[in-house]
Amino acid sequence: MKALKSILLGLFGIIAVLILFLAIMAFISFIQEKLFVPDSSLLWIFKSPASKFIFIYEFCLMFALFLLLNKDSRKWFSGFFKKHRKILFPIFFIVNIMLFYAIVTDVAVITKNKISNHSFLVPQGKQYNFNDITKITTGIYGKSHFLGPSKGDFYYIIELSGGTKIDLGDNGVSPISFDEDDNNNDEADFRFILAKLDRQWVDMGIQKKSSMSNFKYTFASLNRTYSDKIRSILENNK
């Protein structure tokens, strides 16, 4: 009976952690949109690597759950924290403020005529015109990277004047916002918006390097509608 109770508590705890983590993600997304995304935006990207930092919150929640379920570990941690609280509390407070700030500010926004690149050091955002795009590199990742893209992920990297690079295909973790005039659910997907921008940029004569290598890996995780749209982006060259 005791074992069953522990299992049930563990399951409920994991569910609670997932709900809290999703709530944190939604809250961060809400703040980003309110602070940085104008009504005229076509899409916005929660950039890497800051987008990966959000999983630190999940780790912290899982650690808290572990302490809640493990009496001995909870007792040890409580004693350790009380002994070093004068040092640990300020460190915890400062690190969390910096972490939250870094996550919230790492956003890129694209409107019909400009790109705003926000970052930790430039939270107000640096503005670029489409003419400032010097190069486009796009394709499919052929292997997974630790704390990075997965095999079969689509990348669409624009290089801006000054050497700044932004991956507009970072859809695995990126909240994307679309033009509300798009009523078709499929055509509101970021790949369809990006395809329109891609045609515009290629027509402007912007250098583009695309690769169909590894395209087959998209079929494992994407509906045919979306993989076909990615194909159209990769094949769109002058």
Image (cartoon, rainbow, N blue to C red):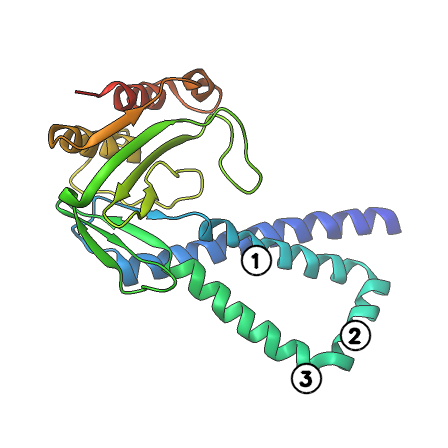
- Mark 2 and mark 1 lie on one chain; the one further toward the N terminus is 1
> What residue would you read off at disc 2?
80
Residue type, mark 2 in image: Phe
> What residue would you read off at disc 1?
57
Q: What label does residue 86 carry, if any?
A: 3
Left or right, residue 139 beside residue 24: left
Residue type, mark 3 in image: Lys
Callouts 2 and 3 close, C-beta under 8 Å: no
Total labels drawn: 3
Q: Residue reaching furthest top?
A: 216
Q: Residues within 10 Å of mark 1 (few under 14, many from 20)?
A: some
Q: Secondary structure at mark 3?
A: helix
Q: Nearer the viewer, residue 88 or 9?
A: 88
Q: Position of residue 163 (x, y in %)?
A: 30, 47
- Give the alpha-carbon distance from disc 2 to disc 1, as whole Å: 21 Å
Left or right, residue 16 beside residue 202: right
